[in-house]
Image (spheres, grey):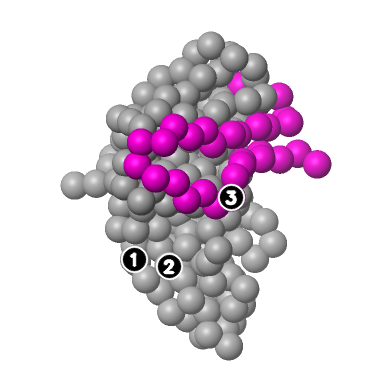
Amino acid sequence: EAQVTQNPRYLITVTGKKLTVTCSQNMNHEYMSWYRQDPGLGLRQIYYSMNVEVTDKGDVPEGYKVSRKEKRNFPLILESPSPNQTSLYFCASSIRQGTYSPLHFGNGTRLTVT
Amino acid sequence: KNEVEQSPQNLTAQEGEFITINCSYSVGISALHWLQQHPGGGIVSLFMLSSGKKKHGRLIATINIQEKHSSLHITASHPRDSAVYICAVPKTSYDKVIFGPGTSLSVIP
């Protein structure tokens, strides 16, 4: 089954403790992206990747890192999480952004930083 | 002014009603996504369109490139259509995606 898999679904952590949210797609998509969703602010793009080893900042990249060493995986890393990073996170992929292809979303990760 | 705007912000409809949600954008290339997010959080892509009209079941999406406006129509609405509907525009061919604020739809039996 074609899908985008995010893990974990829920995560509670403390300020400063490094964490990684994983994202994997099995559709051989070139484009992958991370978003956060906050009440009143909607979805905002954190980072995106157009292919292996090619990543770029979205609108809210501060406090996050990403890597794209393999086509299928695009982990989101929070080196030193802070409470303002408490949010609902989504990973998404598409064949290639420029070909007007649909976005496929993961199920989301609800992160709480205390 | 937001780059992607939606109206209405909230919508309550009786089951069976015809529903229209609008999206206007001031940036982006000539394409647009419509997304659906049910309570509980998962996001599903409904349409990706760059011209004209697309139909999937009771859902119809239209886009007017010149006016930078798109509409999502739901015919014969049903309570299971209750969700937040979000439009999104890729800013350039290989670039950022800008999301609208969403329209929260509640369909009452």
- The chain ID associated with circle 3 is A
Q: Which residues are magenta?
A: A1-30
Label 1: chain letter:
B
Residue at the extreme bottom of the image, as rendered:
B109
For the residues carrying marks 3 and 2, which lies nearer the camera in this image? 3
Looking at the image, the residue that sits furthest to the top is A53
Q: Position of residue B26 (x, y in %)?
A: 28, 40
Which residue is labeled 1 in the image? Answer: B9
Residue located beneath label 2 in the image: B104
What's the residue type where badge 3 is placed? Arg
Q: Residue A13 in the image: state x and y as whole percent.
A: 44, 46
Q: Tag 2: residue type? A: Ser
Q: Residues within 10 Å of mark 3 (few under 14, many from 20)?
A: some
Residue contact between numbered discs 3 and 2, judged by CB atoms under 8 Å: no
Quote the CA–CA distance across marks 3 and 2. 24 Å
Give the residue pinned by disc 3: A9
Q: In terms of secondary structure, where does tag 2 sit? A: strand
Badge 1 vs badge 3, beta-carbon distance below 8 Å: no
Q: CA distance from mark 1 to mark 3?
A: 28 Å
Q: CA distance from mark 2 to mark 1?
A: 6 Å
**Are tags 2 and 1 found on a single chain?**
yes
**Is residue A9 inside the magenta stretch?**
yes
